[in-house]
Image (cartoon, rainbow, N blue to C red):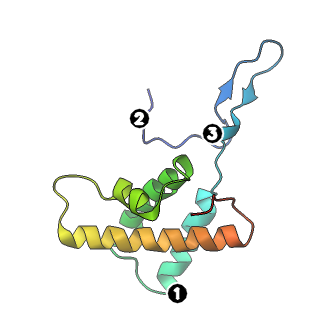
Amino acid sequence: MLSSMAQPDPVYLPTRPRAHGRPRPVPYAAPTVDLQAEYQFWQAYERLVRPLPGGGLRLAWLVFQNVYRARERFPDDTHEAALARVLFGSNMTPERAVELQDLYGLVSRRLATVAARGQLLLSPR
């Protein structure tokens, strides 16, 4: 059984049965962000711009996936509500909270840039 944090395989999108014929993909479950392209972007960002906070890309990527997933599942969230989805846990230190806020800001700016180029549709904030 898959955990709730598992990413769907983009080759085999979730399907729903039809009365007649083959199952069809569930449109709302289709990924809207190309995670492989995003990973490559953040690799280049870390090399060319600055190191990512919180221990580099390997650790930041887990946070990035949470942010991408939350923005996809809850597109109408305000920035505060979306950030609250990332900042969780009772053992959150102030230093880690600042790192997560910085990472959230980076992803938010990236998504806004990609949406402005017309490569991704986001609802207005």
Q: Is mark 1 on a helix, strand or loop?
A: helix
Above or below residue 13? Residue 55 is below
For label 2, count other residues whose C-alpha is less than 10 Å away and answer few (under 14), some (14-19) or many (20+).
few
Q: How far apart are marks 1 and 3 (CA)?
A: 34 Å
* Number of marks: 3
Marks 1 and 3: which is nearer the front?
Answer: 3
Comes first in the chain, label 1 or label 3 = 3
Residue 81 at x, y percent in the picture: 40, 57
Q: What element carries label 3?
A: helix
Residue occupying image coordinates x 28% and y 73%: 98
Marks 2 and 3: which is nearer the front?
Answer: 3
- Please state which amino acid type lies under the numbered disc 2: Ser
Asked if one can make out residue 70 in the rendered structure from this viewpoint, the answer is yes
Residue occupying image coordinates x 36% and y 64%: 59
Residue beneath label 2, please? Answer: 3
Residue beneath label 3, please? Answer: 29
Which residue is outermost to the bottom?
Answer: 49
The answer to which image quadrant residue 23 occupies is top right
Residue 57 at x, y percent in the picture: 42, 69
For label 1, count other residues whose C-alpha is less than 10 Å away and answer few (under 14), some (14-19) or many (20+).
few
